[in-house]
Amino acid sequence: MTSAAACSATDPWLAHSVTIDRVIPETPGVATYDFVFTDDNVGGRYSFLPGQFNMLYLPGVGEVAISISGNPADRSKLPHTIRVAGNVTQELARLGEGGSLGLRGPFGASWPLADCAGMDVVLVAGGIGLAPLRPAIYDLLANRDRYGRLTLLYGSRTPAGLLYTDEYEQWRARGLDIQTTVDRTTDHWKGNVGVVTTLLERLTLPRPENTALMTCGPEVMMWYTIQSARECGFRDDNLYVSLERNMNCAVGLCGHCQFGPEFICKDGPVFRYDRVTSILKVDDL
Ligand SMILES: Cc1cc2nc3c(=O)[nH]c(=O)nc-3n(C[C@H](O)[C@H](O)[C@H](O)COP(=O)(O)OP(=O)(O)OC[C@H]3O[C@@H](n4cnc5c(N)ncnc54)[C@H](O)[C@@H]3O)c2cc1C
């Protein structure tokens, strides 16, 4: 089971003021924004679990769901890695360092890291899908001795689209096997070319039945990743996906992201695969 959201001591309806402390350009159109709470008391109470998201509010523009991409153990900053998509994300990029906005959260279910103790763990990310997995990487590496083999398989359209490349060396040194691949190569690229599922199919898995897989990226990528994992011998109840849908309230009331009994905002965004097989088959839900 994924862990329930239980770490907010704040009112889920109340947006708190945060300031953009730093903007780190990552890849074309994508940057990481480090937020700090204007009120230290709120910042002191705030904590999150890997895989959770916040609602970012720009008055007069709108509110959007964005995953938290930082280290849950580092309370000094609250990073969010954001791709400019439309009105809110464009305005956020325009605000830049020193700008302020509203933030409510954290919301949603987290990656089931505690349940994976003693297991091997494979993370499979596509493009900006590495952002919600980065807190899981920090947490897994901070508790390295609790897990068996840790592997990150990461695919992007181009080499320039790979996120957080300056951290890979440190992650490798701490025990994470990282394999990357790109859809389209450039002259300088000496690595793998092809979809991320090819990396999974080539992986030597000593005990697939005791390996957890967590994936985030475009839905079609997650779908094929899950199919490959099942063929490799993973158990359905060890497969986890993070789903992204348009959502408004983030607390399971407005119904925008409801699918049958599941609310993506409240029961997800992290789901065990066998609970959402039917959702994954519906486009543009
Ligand atoms: C749980 C969750 C976590 C997310 N985490 C991140 C993240 O870490 N980084 C990031 O860059 N984005 C993330 N997103 C997507 C982000 O919420 C949307 O890109 C954002 O709402 C766009 O807002 P906008 O006003 O800039 O664009 P809009 O003008 O609202 O939309 C621009 C385009 O994006 C589409 N869109 C809007 N919302 C979504 C959505 N939720 N899913 C898919 N397409 C959408 C619209 O249909 C439109 O085509 C997340 C979404 C969810 C639900």
Image (cartoon, rainbow, N blue to C red):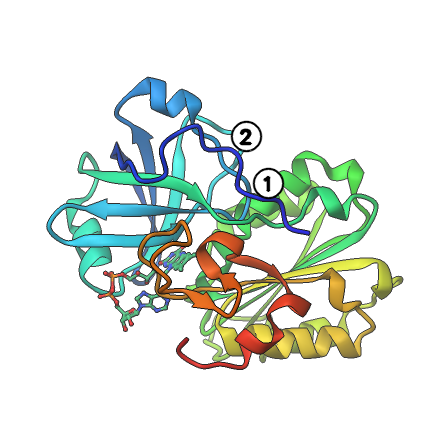
- Assess disc 1: are there few (<14), some (14-19) or many (≥20) residues with their C-alpha within 10 Å of its C-alpha: some
Q: Is any atom of residue 264 visible in this view?
A: yes
Disc on res. 73: 2
User: Which residue is at the far left?
Assistant: 60
In the rendered structure, which disc, 1 or 2, sits on the residue that comes first in sequence? 2
Give the image location of residue 255, x and y in percent: 37, 62
Image coords of residue 235 (percent x, y): 80, 67
Image x and y of residue 192, in percent: 61, 74
- Residue at image position (44%, 55%) is 265
Q: What secondary structure is marked by label 1?
A: helix
Q: Residue at x 52, y 56 (%)?
A: 268
Please tell me which residue lies in front, 87 or 63: 63
Residue 21: name its quadrant.
Answer: top left
Badge 2 density bin: few <14, some 14–19, many ≥20, Cα 10 Å: few
Q: Quadrant of the C terminus?
A: bottom left
Question: In the drawing, does residue 34 fall left or right of residue 225?
Answer: left
Taking the image as shown, residue 234 lies to the left or right of residue 177, namely: right
Residue occupying image coordinates x 44% and y 81%: 283
Query: In which of the image's four quarters is ligand 1 placed?
Result: bottom left
Task: Please provide percent x and percent y for residue 67.
Answer: 43, 50
Please give the label number shown on residue 138. Answer: 1
Q: Are marks 1 and 2 in contact (CB under 8 Å)?
A: yes
Which three-letter amino acid code belongs to the residue tagged 2? Ala
What secondary structure is found at the residue carrying circle 2?
loop
Q: Is residue 191 above or below residue 66?
A: below
The label shown at residue 248 is none
The reply, left or right, for residue 188 in relation to residue 193 is: left
Amino acid type indicated by mark 1: Tyr
